[in-house]
Image: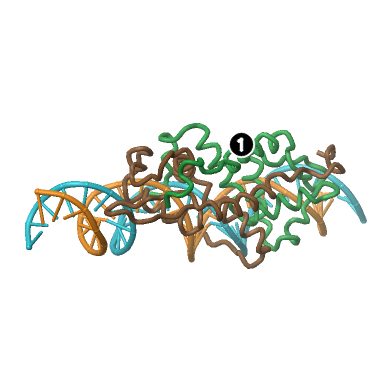
Chain colours: A green, B brown, C orange, D cyan
Amino acid sequence: MGITKSEIYTKQQNEIAQIAKVIGHPARVAILEHLFKAQSCICGDLVEEIGLAQPTISQHLKELKNMGFIKGTIEGTSVCYCIDETNWESMQQVLTSFITQNPSSKNKNCC
Amino acid sequence: MGITKSEIYTKQQNEIAQIAKVIGHPARVAILEHLFKAQSCICGDLVEEIGLAQPTISQHLKELKNMGFIKGTIEGTSVCYCIDETNWESMQQVLTSFITQNPSSKNKNCC
DNA sequence: CATATTAATTGTAATATTGCAATAAACAAA
DNA sequence: TTTGTTTATTGCAATATTACAATTAATATG
């Protein structure tokens, strides 16, 4: 039915999935990479940089902002986006703790 | 249009997104966690463990298998699933290298 | 004020994802 | 062979996501 049954999972499982989902699109990966590399704030060159239409980029930025990955401040007619460092670090930790798991030694050669 | 324009991104960006996308669903997070914790191979208790219908679990397992997260060996009528350690480690690295990024010091206080 | 510039919003179309009932397939055991 | 057990597949229905054209909103500049 296209709807995820969030209520049957733990809070942590939902959180991990939510964070990963945002990273689960190459446009958003590209945006984040761009913001990480930038020597200064990026104020709208993302459109030509990435090659999607302006409304599409705007939509991806909105999603990134909603999840707390980035923040934007208005500067004249343009908007200055950058990584929300505090949030990023906490999400970094949530994802890392999941990813750095390794199979328990006891089941290493059962398959 | 619901279709991702993969061709405009780098190979690496697509790879990161693809891996993250699989983790981007709580059911698959739950399955992976279960397989990590398991003292022995899991052969089908995932359905009652997680609380989704059997075809749904089967579908998520298929996706995990397609991406190389897990592998399954047939044992009689049941199937034994476990983490594909080699693949897991390489995907671990791809995601980690993206996640462990931090904003360059030069743009720290521009927003 | 009129005009340009930049970003957000709205509306819409196409495709993808999630979930399950029903069924099939594969095998073990009686 | 028949019956049970376990997992995969098929076929849907509902919802979500991706993308963009058209428009709007907000602000700067002439």
Residue D20, relative to residue A97: is it above or below?
below
Residue plotted at (62% across, 60% down) = B14
Residue A98 placement (x, y as % from top left): 57, 40
Furthest-bottom residue in view? Answer: B7
Q: Report helix, strand or loop for mark 1.
A: helix
Q: Residue at label 1?
A: A94
Instruction: Name the image quarter holding the C terminus of chain B.
Output: top right
- Choose between B87 and C2: the one closer to the eye: B87
Residue plotted at (53% across, 47% down) = B23
Residue plotted at (82% across, 50% down) = A38
Furthest-top residue in view? Answer: A11
- Residue D25 is drawn in which quadrant? top right
Residue plotted at (46% across, 40% down) = B30
Label 1 crowd (10 A; few <14 / some 14-19 / many >=20): some
- Residue A46 is drawn in which quadrant? bottom right
Q: In the drawing, does residue B35 fall left or right of residue B48?
A: right
- Choose between A19 and D29: the one closer to the eye: A19
Q: How many marks?
A: 1
Residue B60 placement (x, y as % from top left): 42, 51
Identify the chain of the residue marked 1, using the numbered disc in the image: A
Q: Amino acid at mark 1?
A: Val
Residue B36 placement (x, y as % from top left): 49, 41
Residue A20 placement (x, y as % from top left): 58, 45
- Choose between D18 and A105: the one closer to the eye: A105
Q: In the drawing, does residue B102 fall left or right of residue B31?
A: right
Q: In the drawing, does residue A55 fall left or right of residue A80?
A: left
